[in-house]
Image (cartoon, rainbow, N blue to C red):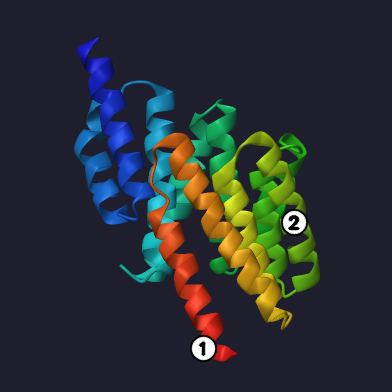
């Protein structure tokens, strides 16, 4: 019983640090407690978190980008091979396409995205990842259209974080299309969704809010 509580608290602590944008600290906590994890699903959860931590560490420039993204890919792939849990698989299969794409493996990115959509066709977040790939492909119209569908489906499920991601990604696409006023409205809607997520779950989405706020300021500066 004590060990179970210890494991639960360590993984929850690492997730909390990730939610706060403290990716380096989250990885340190996971490393400190990894030897205490004994079940496959516990280790899969640790690797899933490490995958996301290394992804953000890489794209935010906190460490060498290439090396961090390679570690992200390895952690995600290890986690995917370990877990039978649908929630974990969805999270992992949302991260892997992004990592593959940035590493120049676009074919692999689409392949994992296709697999995620095939396995979880009604899950809004896998379509949200698809919208990012469309945007990176510079198919901004397709990206914006998918985002709007993701937003509606996520709201219907009460998944406010994914709804926020959808609005943020829609705004990114609209900005590229020169639809600045619509992009500003979508960024504002994203912040509203993130705040609803915080109220509903007690978890922080502040680093998402901060990121959207910076984009709104930059958008205003370009007008």
Say whether marks 1 and 2 touch (CB < 8 Å).
Answer: no
Q: Position of residue 119 (x, y in %)?
A: 72, 35
- Give the quadrant of residue 97: bottom right
Quadrant location of the N terminus in the rendered image: top left
- Mark 2, residue position: 148
- Give the quadrant of residue 13: top left
Mark carried by residue 221: 1
- Relative to 170, residue 195 above or below: above
* Front-lying residue, 112 or 190: 190
Q: Residues within 10 Å of mark 2 (few under 14, many from 20)?
A: some
- Relative to 32, residue 73 above or below: below
Residue at 19% of width from left, 39% of height from top? 32
Q: Could you give the CA–CA distance between mark 1 and mark 2, rounded to whole angstroms? A: 26 Å
Looking at the image, residue 107 sits to the left or right of residue 100; the answer is right
- Relative to 30, residue 149 above or below: below
Residue at 52% of width from left, 34% of height from top? 88
Task: Give the mark nearer the N terminus: 1 vs 2.
Answer: 2
Q: Position of residue 48 (x, y in %)?
A: 44, 41
* Front-lying residue, 205 or 26: 205
Q: Position of residue 137 (x, y in %)?
A: 71, 72
Q: Nearer the viewer, mark 1 or mark 2?
A: 1
- Give the quadrant of residue 155: top right
Residue at 40% of width from left, 65% of height from top? 58
Q: Position of residue 29 (x, y in %)?
A: 23, 42
Quadrant location of the C terminus in the rendered image: bottom right
Looking at the image, residue 22 sits to the left or right of residue 218; the answer is left
Mark carried by residue 157: none
Looking at the image, residue 28 sits to the left or right of residue 53; the answer is left
Count of number-bearing discs? 2
User: Does dot 1 land on a helix, a strand or a loop?
Assistant: helix
User: Does dot 2 land on a helix, a strand or a loop?
Assistant: helix
Q: Residues within 10 Å of mark 1 (few under 14, many from 20)?
A: few
């Amino acid at each position: 019983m004590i060990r179970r509580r210890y494991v639960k608290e360590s993984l929850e602590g690492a997730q909390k640090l990730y939610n706060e944008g403290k990716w380096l600290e989250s990885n340190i906590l996971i490393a400190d407690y990894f030897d205490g994890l004994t079940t496959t699903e516990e280790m899969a959860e640790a690797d899933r978190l490490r995958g996301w931590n290394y992804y953000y560490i890489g794209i935010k420039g906190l460490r060498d980008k290439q090396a961090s993204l390679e570690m992200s890919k390895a952690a995600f792939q290890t986690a995917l091979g370990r877990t039978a849990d649908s929630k974990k698989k969805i999270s992992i299969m949302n991260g892997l396409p992004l990592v593959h794409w940035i590493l120049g493996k676009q074919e692999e990115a689409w392949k994992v995205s296709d697999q995620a959509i095939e396995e979880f066709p009604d899950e809004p977040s896998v379509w949200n990842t698809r919208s990012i790939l469309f945007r990176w492909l510079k198919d901004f119209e397709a990206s914006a259209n998918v985002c709007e569908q993701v937003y509606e489906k996520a709201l219907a499920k009460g998944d406010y974080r994914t709804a926020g991601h959808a609005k943020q990604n829609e705004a990114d696409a609209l900005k590229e299309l020169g639809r600045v006023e619509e992009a500003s409205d979508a960024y504002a809607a994203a912040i509203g969704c993130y705040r609803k997520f915080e109220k509903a779950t007690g978890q922080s989405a502040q680093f998402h809010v901060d990121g959207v706020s910076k984009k709104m300021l930059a958008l205003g500066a370009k007008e």
